[in-house]
Image (tube, rainbow, N blue to C red):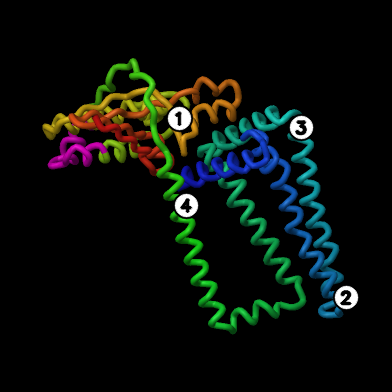
Amino acid sequence: MIKIIFGLLCGLLYCIGLCFGWNYQETSVYFCIYLWPVLCVLSTLPITVGLIHRIVIDKGRWLSVLALPFAWLYTTCYVCFTILIYNYYQGSVPQIFNKCMNDLQRIAAECNTTYEDVNIAIYIYLFALILLVNGTLAYIAKPYHKRWRELVSNREKQKIIMKRSLLILVAIVLVVYVVLSAFSLVKTADRPATNYQLPKELKERITNETQGMDEMDIVNYGLRLTGKLLDFSEKNNLKGGKANCVGYAQLCASITNYGLKTNKREGSCKPVVGYVTWAGMNLCTILSDIVPNEYKNFVKDHDFVEFNLKDKTIFYDPSIYDYLGTKALTTINR
């Protein structure tokens, strides 16, 4: 789920950048380094406004007078934190982007978690917590809550809000479905690599768990099992449970081929090289423009699995499936 959220947020930043003529690095820096701290500062201001309002209308005046310096100090802390961030991240946009990425990767390594988890924790969970705390404090500081009381006492309005919320939720689900369905795969070459030799224990597991399955059931089984056995990593270490897209494709193809063989099903799989498209856009080319120079060779192409049947060829992606929950299924009929 974390990976899906992270992927959607990266796509959202990229789309926002297209609207303003920014690349992904520029959008990330403007939003995550410059705008994020400012929004946190602005979220503290309603607390001070509410306390001043209380003093003016003489509703809890003396308590508000005592609380006002603490509210100013609270806002000042956020301002100082913002200044520290701006002073720490100085330089050109690529320099700031690379420095921030390295910092997040170092935090992930020290916390024994992933780069995606750290991003979500800081820019989603922490931001939501800050807004929740500051919103609660601002609500307490506000002298009147007439609209809130009207909403609580009006059941008709509650029903309307519930219906609208449900419609919004359904719309979000549909949008996510459409976004994930827009992925497709384009092959450029076969992967010049030998098949991964499955351990004896894994072979026994595949034999027991695939009994009676047809071809597509075995394909889906291979996708699920590959995701369970591997975590994404820059370097391949299949025995250690770490792999990049090359390792994902090799292991998935080997699992699927063995399942087909033991069940005497037609078809064969092999890892291939190509690129991923979304709505016709080459994502490998886009990522090459986004990532730092040291990662450009890593994202210039992508490995996935080719499954050949008599009447068609199916391409599917075990690493994207593990990352986003979609197979990026692409079928070519013969």
Crowding around mark 1 (Cα neighbors within 10 Å: few <14, some 14 to 19, many 20+) is some
Reading the image, the residue beneath label 4 is 175
First of labels 4, 2 by sequence position: 2
Q: Nearer the viewer, mark 4 or mark 1?
A: 4
Question: In 3D space, how far apart are the residues under numbered discs 1 and 3 (Cα atoms)?
Answer: 30 Å
Crowding around mark 3 (Cα neighbors within 10 Å: few <14, some 14 to 19, many 20+) is few
Crowding around mark 4 (Cα neighbors within 10 Å: few <14, some 14 to 19, many 20+) is few
Identify the residue at image location x=29%, y=17%. 194
| Residue 85 left/right relative to 291 | right
Q: Nearer the viewer, mark 4 or mark 3?
A: 4
Identify the residue at image location x=56%, y=35%. 110
Magenta extent: 202-219
Question: In 3D space, how far apart are the residues under numbered discs 1 and 2 (Cα atoms)?
Answer: 59 Å
Q: Is residue 237 visible?
A: no
Question: In 3D space, how far apart are the residues under numbered discs 3 and 2 (Cα atoms)?
Answer: 42 Å
Reading the image, the residue beneath label 2 is 56
Contact, CB < 8 Å: mark 1 with mark 2? Answer: no
Question: In 3D space, how far apart are the residues under numbered discs 4 and 1 (Cα atoms)?
Answer: 29 Å
